[in-house]
Structures are given as C-alpha cells and as structure tokens.
Image (cartoon, rainbow, N blue to C red):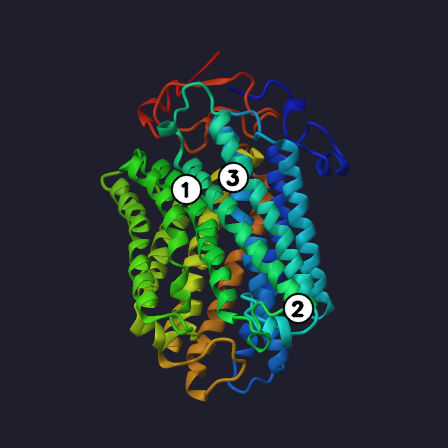
Amino acid sequence: MQLTAEREHYLNASYGLKSWLLTKDHKRIGLLYLFTITLFFFIGGAFATLIRLELLTPQGDLVSDDVYNRLFTMHAIAMIFFFMIPSIPAVLGNFFLPIMIGARDLAFPRINLLSWYLLVAGGAFALFAMIAGGVDTGWTFYTPYSTTYANGWVIATALGIFIAGFSSILTGLNFIVTVHRMRAPGMTWFRMPLFVWANYATSLIQILGTPVLAVTIVLLFVERVFHLGIFDPARGGDPVLFQHLFWFYSHPAVYIMVLPGMGVISEVISTFSRKPVFGYAFVAFSSVAIAVLGFLVWGHHLFVSTQSAFAGLVFSFLSYFVAIPSAIKVFNWTATLYKGSISFETPMLYAFGFIGLFTIGGLTGLFLAALGIDIHVTDTYFVVAHFHYVMVGGTIMAFLAGMHFWWPKITGRMYPEGWAKLSALIVFVGFNLTFFPQFILGYMGMPRRYHAYPPEFQVLNVLSTAGASVLAIGYLMPMVYFTWSLKYGKVAGANPWGATGLEWKTASPPPVHNFDETPIVTHDAYDYSTVHGEEIQVG
C-alpha cells in the first residue's frame, strides 16, 4: 500500500509550528514527545557527567557535598520521570500502536495532545526548580527530610512530577481504549503484536499505580506547607508510611519503563531471526503477569526499615516470584533465536545488548531480594549498578533498538548501517565499563550518594568515569547520523526489513490516516510464510 500523493504524507500534510502544536495526529505527537524527552536526556546526562567527574578523585574537590546532593537528585528526576517513563510508550507507542492494530489514530486524539502538554508543563516546573537551585532530597523525596529540612524547591519539583503523572495516566487510558475498541477486522487478541501487549500491560500500571504517587505528593505538600503530622515523627507522623506509598508506585514504575522495551525486543528478535516468537501466548501473558505482580513487591525496598522480619520474608519470596515472567521472556527470545535465520542489523545488536544487560540486572536483583545480602549492600553502589543495568541497560537499549528498527518507517530514510553498528558496540562496551565496577564497589562497602570516599576505591571509580565517557560517545552518535539521514539517507521502502505486521504494509513515512483503506487481518502475528505475500487484505 503506497503513498498516493505527497500531500498525504504525515510530515507534509501542513506546515508551520502552529500545525504541530495543535496537531491531533498520533504520529506527530509521538515526535513531539521524542523532542521533549531528548531534551531531558541531555539535561540528565549533563548532571551525570558532573557526578562522574566529581568521583574521579576521593577528596570531593570539584563540588561541595550540598551541590553533589542536588546533582544526583536532579539527574535521577530528569532521567526517570521525564525521559525513561515516557520514552517508549509515549514515543514509539504513540507512533506505532494504532498502526500495528490497523487503527487510524488513538481513541482520544485531543487527550493525546493534552498528555504531551501535561508532560511539558510538568517538565517546566522541574526545570524551573533546577535553574532556581535544585533539590537535594534524592529522587525518592524521603520524609521527614523532604518535608522539614530540604531546600524550598521541593514543592516546585514535586508539582512537576505530579502534573507529569497525569500525562502518564491519560496515555495509559488512551492505549487501553484504543486496543479494546479500535482493532482492525480480524485483529484478535492473539493476533496482536507483542509490542501492543506490552504497552497494554504498561497502561494498566500507569492507570492503577500513578494515582498513588499523586496522592503521596499531595500528602507531602500538605505536611510541608501546613505542618500536619502525616510523615514527620515529631508531629506524630510515620516516615515509613511515605516509603510504603512511594514504592507501591515506584517499583511498578520500573515496569512502566521496562515492559514496553520488552515488547520492542520481541518485534526485533522475530524480524531478524525470521521466526515467530516462541511461545507467543506465554510471552503475551507474561507481560500481564509482570504488571500484576509488580504491585506486590514494593516491600523489598524496606528490608532495613521498621518492617517486620515476617513481612520481609513474604516480600523476599514475592520478589523472587516476579522474576519468573521476565525469565519466561528471556527464555522464549532465546528459543526464538534457535535455528533462526539470524541477521545482525543494528536493531538486533541492541536487542542482544538488552538481553545481556537486563539479565545481569535481573540476576543481581535476586541478590537484593535476599534479606541477608540486601542488608549488606543497601545504599551502596551495588544498588546503583543493579538499577542502571535494569533501567539504562534495559529501557535505553530497547529504546535505541526500537528507534533503529522503526526509523525507516518514521522518516522514510535509512541511516548509515556501519556507523549505527559501531555506536551499538560503543554503547555496550561503555555501559559495562561504567557500571560493572560499581557492583564491586558496592560489595566492598562504598556507599552511594557520597561525594568523597576512601582512596582504595579510586581505581574502580576512574574506570567507571572512563566508561561514562565512552558511553556518552555511543549515545551521541545516533543523534548525528539520524539527523544526517533525514536529508542524505537512502530512501526506505515500505518494508526494508522484510518484517510482518501492519505498520510494514503502509508507506514509509505513513500517510496521515495510516492506511488508505481499512486493513483486514487474516494471519497470526509473525507469520513469515506470508511476508512476501498478502499479510492483509484491503477492502
């Protein structure tokens, strides 16, 4: 199904900034999200650079301890709330979920645009707080510190996160309604791509979990402004209550970041091994299982709090149990590769990187789920390394896999494959050089969030900073060659990878309304016996 006229091109349908700021086209809104999260990625990256430069030497001689507290807090806030949480659902999900189920748009186009404006508004409050002096509480805003002792920009930052949370809720609502109500004829639940399943499960977390964070922020605001005794023990409050509320959202939020990435990996591995995903139904239901079980494990963040030993044992067991659905995905991806016709294009390299790094992150999570080991490594760099292997090694690797996989569809242009493969290699090497030494540092006892440390830890910190420099180069390279490809890249056909799925049955870039005529699906997802024939019928 080819583009019938250039004026129907979603990028050329109308011109001018106003047409973008008032657009209701899910594809354009996805690109608006891309520009927004890219800005926050560079802001968070700048703070990370200063952190690593400070840790080059043991003395803490680049910035003061107070400034260092603000640096790691603002790095985490920018990266978690304004980059990683919206990255794959809001960018790739917004762009491709309707096309992948044969819809002309999301169910609520105006709400979709409102969701982007809410993210921008929330980001503006957070940026204001950063420029005005920053926040020094850590991204967890633990009380009573955040309600009593921290600097005055806590409220502005918390308000930014509060507003951005509504963006997440509305996006999840839009995805759920779209999947339920707007699938093309023949697109049954078990013909949906696994990327759609992953975003659907993520949407459940966004709708059920994010309001808890909103309520927690409101309670923090009320205590800080009106001095009520909610969390402050001096006023009869309970600071551990804040931790329960915060982690009830924030641990499922890990899966808001990772689950859509798992959907990306399923698409990529199937395409570049030329095989259906092994155990499709198990992989689909594992996404839902992760979404459900993710709400039952928040207590493993409180092993060293006043939580009872019995509760700790229960949460330890549940934390091991929640690893099973993730293990199913890794096993099934590996089984998909078995005897596949594997090709090593750039998206596949990032997918391999995701599997390796996420597996390390998942396995080290089991260490933290064991009470004895967790007590030893709590608040050390072991936790920092684990978190980044899951979040950065998972979410960002999957995001880059998805961007390289779907870039020809988004822009109609191919990127230089050689440079892209080199960037994938640099990212993988740089990431491991940055964060693997931190596992050792943490086990040796180096606490996180300290700007000075004993001299015996310096060598590993120098390795970590050197790795961060390599990683930064790897992250910057796609920005350069993606931009270059917009003008000079080879023109992409409708299906440059020979993939299945409805998004590959329309032009590159897609028309304004995705399809000239409503598609009718007649085959299961990942049916490569039909990839060169008729995956869909038009009528």
Q: Secondary structure at mark 1?
A: helix
Residue 168, given in percent of the width and then of the height, sits at 57, 46
- Cα–Cα gap, marks 2 and 1: 40 Å
Up/down of 114 relative to 459, above or below: above
The residue indicated by pointer 3 is 93
Q: Is residue 272 left or right of residue 163?
A: left
Specify the amino acid type for callout 3: Gly
Q: Disc number at residue 224?
A: 2
Would you place residue 48 above or below residue 92 in this image? below
Residue 263 appears in view: yes
Q: Disc 2 and disc 3: Cα gap in Å?
A: 37 Å
Query: Which numbered disc, 2 or 1, marks the residue that appears first in the sequence?
Result: 2
On the picture, is 288 further left or further right than 113? left
Relative image position of residue 477 (x, y in whole percent): 54, 54
- The disc placed on residue 263 is 1
Mark 2 residue crowding within 10 angstroms, few (<14) / some (14–19) / many (20+): many
Q: Which class describes the residues within 10 Å of circle 1: few (<14), some (14-19), or many (20+)?
A: many
Mark 1 / mark 3, whichever is N-terminal: 3
Residue 193 position by quadrant: top left
- Would you call the spot at circle 3 few (<14 residues within 10 Å), some (14-19), or many (20 or more)? many
